[in-house]
Amino acid sequence: MTEPEGAARTWPARRRLVLRVALAVAVVALIYFGLLPKLVDIDQVVATLRAMTWLELATLLAAATWNLASYLLPQLAALPGLSLRQAVLESHASTAVGNLMPVGQAVGLGVTYRFYTSYGFERSPIGLSLLVQGVWNNFVKLGMPIVALGLLVASGDAAGELAPAAVVGLVLFALALGGFAFGLSGEGRAARLGRAMAGGVARLRRLVRRPGRPDWERGAVAFRAQAITLLRQRWHWLTLTTLASHLSLFLVLLLALRHVGVSEAEVSWVEALAAFALVRLLSAFPITPGGLGVVELGLAGGLILAGGDEAQVVAAVLVFRLLTFVLPVPLGALTWWLWRRGSWYPLSVHEPM
């Protein structure tokens, strides 16, 4: 008997998933059990963590709580009609999924779409919201190395290690901004951009033996009109909330450094921002779920090169990741359960507040 067509297509997808999981596990094991123990004495790291006071732990937890709350702000700005309760449930659940799953950002978008549709939103505003948030988020990721390089130069610190990343960020930032502006500048240009993107998708689909070409020309024109309306009203809120979200994450790292004993003289806030910006740019490539292992190694290496004590830096990075990577997982499980159970179900967009 021959396998059904659906089953035949499922096996390659499962093999790819298994390979991604195996690669992620191998990378995390190599970093945590191979590289980090060689980089620093783990006993010194544990001693540094134990030396933190309750006040230091409380301020870190407060900063981490604000960081989680800041995730809601761009969503509220990008999707008119979304309530705070709706954003709370969706944000924590999608963040947890993104931290746990291979290619978690893509899966997290699927979770966000599922939540939004359950609230009563139509596909068009959901797609516009997700795309605008993604564009603004990537603008900040690409722009941060450029800003960090400028601050390092202005403060008189060496910036040679950051220069290649800043150049890459500048080029990609210019291309992304140019493409976005091109698509919004006229209906004809939007149609051409949609046609070009559809052609790229068609080529990718041929590579995976799933031929077909999406019809994105009319969709791009409709998106342009909706995006212009949204951005005219909310571009400043989108910019401010996206910046607040990224800087809130950086605040947790900076507090962790200071609370474990890494002083401004050892690693300045500008140097910490440079390491943070570089790792944020590198983490855009989903090697492991949530950049697990890769982020830790990148941050630790950059901050140690900047002058931080090895044990203190590693301790700070581990605290930072505990509060920003691990903490959202149980919160996401709780909000998913509440959403599924319906005991704290938010208002629909069609219901009065």
Image (tube, rainbow, N blue to C red):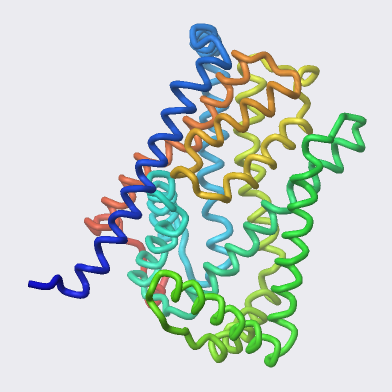
**Image side of residue 109 versus residue 192, left or right:** left
Where is residue 16 shown, x and y percent of the image? Answer: 35, 55
In the image, what residue occupies the spot 25% across and 57% down?
340
Quarter occupied by the N terminus: bottom left
**Image side of residue 181 versus residue 73, left or right:** right
Q: From what the image shows, is residue 330 above or below residue 86?
A: above
What number of labels is visible?
Answer: 0
In the image, what residue occupies the spot 65% across and 62% down?
136
Q: Residue furthest left?
A: 1
In the image, what residue occupies the spot 63% across and 15% down?
310
Q: Residue furthest front?
A: 1
Q: From what the image shows, is residue 145 above or below residue 78?
A: above
- Image-quadrant location for residue 262: top right
- The one nearer the camera, 238 or 111, is 111
Quarter occupied by the C terminus: bottom left
Where is residue 252 shown, x and y percent of the image? Answer: 60, 33
**Image side of residue 69 versus residue 343, left or right:** right
- Image-quadrant location for residue 317: top right
Where is residue 292 shown, x and y percent of the image? Answer: 47, 37
- Image-quadrant location for residue 123: bottom left
- The one nearer the camera, 348 or 141, is 141
In the image, what residue occupies the spot 41% across and 28% down?
29
Where is residue 233 shown, x and y percent of the image? Answer: 68, 75
